[in-house]
Amino acid sequence: MNLKSLTQPEIAQLLKDMQQPSFRAKQLYTWLHKGVRSYDEMANIPKPLRQQLQEKYPICPPEVVRKQESKKDGTIKYLWKLSDGNCVETVLMRYHYGNTVCISTEVGCAMGCAFCASTLGGLVRRLEPFEMLDQVLFTQIDSGLPVSHIVLMGIGEPLDNFDNVMRFLELVNSADGMNISMRHISLSTCGLVPKIDQLAEKKLQLTLSVSLHAPNDAIRNTIMPVNKAYPSQELIDACRRYYDATKRRISFEYAMIDGVNDSKENAQELIRRLKGLPAHFNLIPLNHVEESPHKPSSRKAVEAFQKTLEAAGITATVRRTLGGDIDASCGQLRRKYTKES
Ligand code: SAH
C-alpha cells in the first residue's frame, strides 16, 4: 500500500490507529503531495514517526529512465520506471493557457486500436492512484514548470481502470494536494459505454473526450475492436445521456487517417448522427506508428473535413502536433525502450 493513494480522511484514520494526534494528517498529506522523495524531508514530523512510516509505507517515487525535449516546441516526454520495473510515459505540453500534462493510466492497453502504439504488447497492469499522481507531481518537479491542466490521454484506457482513476481525480483535485481544477482535466475514452454511464452519475466538471475516429460501424469496426462490444449507436446514445446528466459538452477525438475516415461524406454522416448533441471535434492528423499500415490524411483533407463540420455548426479544431521529433505520442517511447532492452 502507498500512502499517496489515500485521501486525507483515510490518512487521518491510519494515523489515529497509530495513536497520533489528528493535526498530523494534514501535515503528512501536504508533504506527500509536494512530492518529497523521503520521509526525512518532513521537517515538522517527529523522527520516530518518520521512521515508522518509512518502514511500513515506503514512498517509492518513479525514476526517470528517458527524458526527451522537443527543440521545436518545448514539449517534454518522460519515460518513468515504476517500483515494479514497469515503464509508463508522461508528456508535458506547453500551451498558451497553461502547462498540460498527459498521463498514462495503465501499463499497456487491452483495447487493440489498429493505429495505436500503446496496445501493441497488450495490457500489463492497471496503475494505482499514486502512480498517476506521481506522473503529474514529478513531471512538475523535474521540469520546474507548474502544471495547470491534465489530460488522461497517455497509455491505457482510463475507464478500464475506473476506481483508481476516480480516486486519482479526487486526490489531484484536493485543496491540500495539487488542487488542480476539474475543469482543467480531460478524460479520454475509446467508448466503454457502461463506464460512461457510471461516470455521468458522478457529475464531474471534467471534459469527457470520446475517441470516435469513424462515422459508422463499418469503418469503426476495422480500426477499433471496442466497437464490436459497444457499436457506435450505443456510444452516441451514451454521449447524449452523458450530456443530459452533466450539461458538459462532449469533445470528440477524430484521428484523420488517409482514405479511411477522412472524406466529405464521412463528415456529413457524422453531422447527421450527432444532430442535436453539443459537441466539439478535435481533428488529429494520425501519428504514423511503424507497425501500422495507416497513414495520416493530407492537410487538404483535414481542412476540408473541418470546414464541413463547422458549416454545420460543430466546432472543430485541428490539433497541433507537438513533440513530433521526440516520439511524443501514445506509447511510442515505451515501445522503443521495451524493444531495445
Ligand atoms: N484509451 C483512451 C485514451 C488514450 S489514447 C482513448 O482511446 O481515448 C488518446 C488518444 O490518442 C485517443 O483518441 C487515441 O485514439 C489517440 N491515438 C492513439 N494513437 C494515435 C495515433 N497513432 N495517431 C493519432 N491519435 C492516436
Image: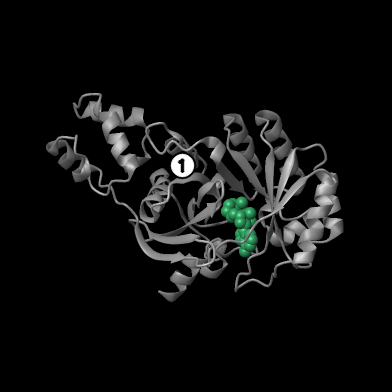
Q: Position of residue 161 (x, y in %)?
A: 51, 45
Q: Which residue shows up at 63% across the image and 69% down it?
A: 288
Q: Quadrant of the C terminus?
A: bottom left
Identity, as a three-letter code, of the amino acid under mark 1 = Asn
Is residue 5 visible to the viewer in this orientation of the structure? Answer: yes
Q: Identify whether 160 is placed above or below 86.
A: above
- Horizontal side of residue 233 vs 204, given as left or right: right
Q: Which residue is mark 1?
A: 164
Residue reaching furthest to the bottom:
340
Taking the image as shown, residue 296 lies to the left or right of residue 33, namely right
**Residue plotted at (45% across, 40% down):** 168
Q: For mark 1, give the secondary structure.
A: helix
Residue at 70 percent across and 61 percent down: it is 223
Q: Quadrant of residue 246?
A: top right
The quadrant of the picture occupied by the N terminus is: top left
Question: In which quarter of the view is residue 298 placed?
Answer: bottom right
Q: Is residue 156 visible?
A: no
Residue 169 vs 137, above or below: the answer is above
- Direction from residue 204 to residue 39 in the image, left or right: left
